[in-house]
Image (cartoon, helix red, strand yellow):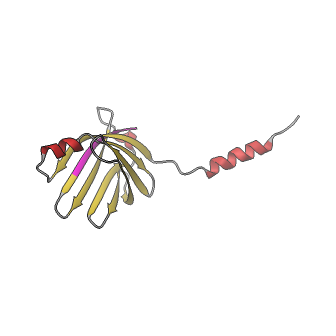
């Protein structure tokens, strides 16, 4: 009888070395877009974006793609995570951004089968808010 311990040890070490699981990867569409801009075309363009949100313990990565805007890939730093929501921020010299993501999206699914996520972007002369419908 021959035992093969090396593959078992190797497989175990690969599992232990794997990166931490995401708290949740969500695929999102824009349900509502609120802005201080009076241009209806700007509102319509922002309603057409698609978002992927990757919620990690210390950060939230937001990938946006759209037919009308250049894609973005932003990383927000988690500031607070309660039993219900995670609040993460991203600041640049020109603007401040906040995202609020459910800690456990599966427990907050609505009757449409989606969960809400909010992104707010503020500068000196504007404020934009995206209300997203997200699924796993």
Identify which residue, 42 or 116, lies in the foreground.
Answer: 42
In the rendered image, the residue lying farthest to the bottom is 93
Residue occupying the far right of the picture: 1
The image shows residue 72 at horizontal and vertical percentages of: 35, 50
Where residue 122 appears, as percent x and y from the top left, is 23, 59
Magenta residues, start to end: 129-136
Vertically, is 126 above or below 115? below
Q: Which image quarter: residue 126?
A: bottom left
The structure residue drawn at horizontal position 69% and vertical position 46%, both measured from the top left corner, is 12
Picture quadrant where residue 32 is located: top left
Q: Residue at x 38, y 46 (%)?
A: 53
As for residue 10 lying within the magenta part, the answer is no
Residue at far top of view: 112
Residue at screen point 88% across, 34% down: 1
Q: Quadrant of the C terminus?
A: top left
Q: Residue furthest left?
A: 38
Q: In the image, residue 39 lies at what x, y percent?
A: 12, 47
Q: In this rendered view, identify the residue nearer to me: 22 or 68.
A: 68
């Amino acid at each position: 009888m021959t035992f093969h311990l090396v593959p078992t040890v190797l497989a175990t070490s690969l599992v232990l070395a794997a990166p931490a699981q995401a708290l949740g990867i969500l695929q999102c569409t824009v349900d509502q877009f609120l802005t201080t801009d009076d241009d209806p075309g700007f509102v319509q363009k922002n309603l057409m974006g698609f978002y992927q949100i990757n919620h990690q313990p210390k950060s939230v990565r937001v990938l946006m793609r759209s037919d009308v805007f250049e894609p973005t890939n932003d990383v927000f730093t988690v500031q607070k995570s309660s039993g219900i929501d995670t609040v993460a921020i991203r600041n640049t010299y020109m603007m401040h951004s906040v995202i609020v993501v459910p800690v456990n999206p599966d427990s907050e699914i609505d009757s449409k089968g989606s969960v809400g996520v909010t992104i707010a972007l503020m500068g000196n002369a504007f404020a934009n808010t995206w209300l997203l419908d997200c699924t796993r």
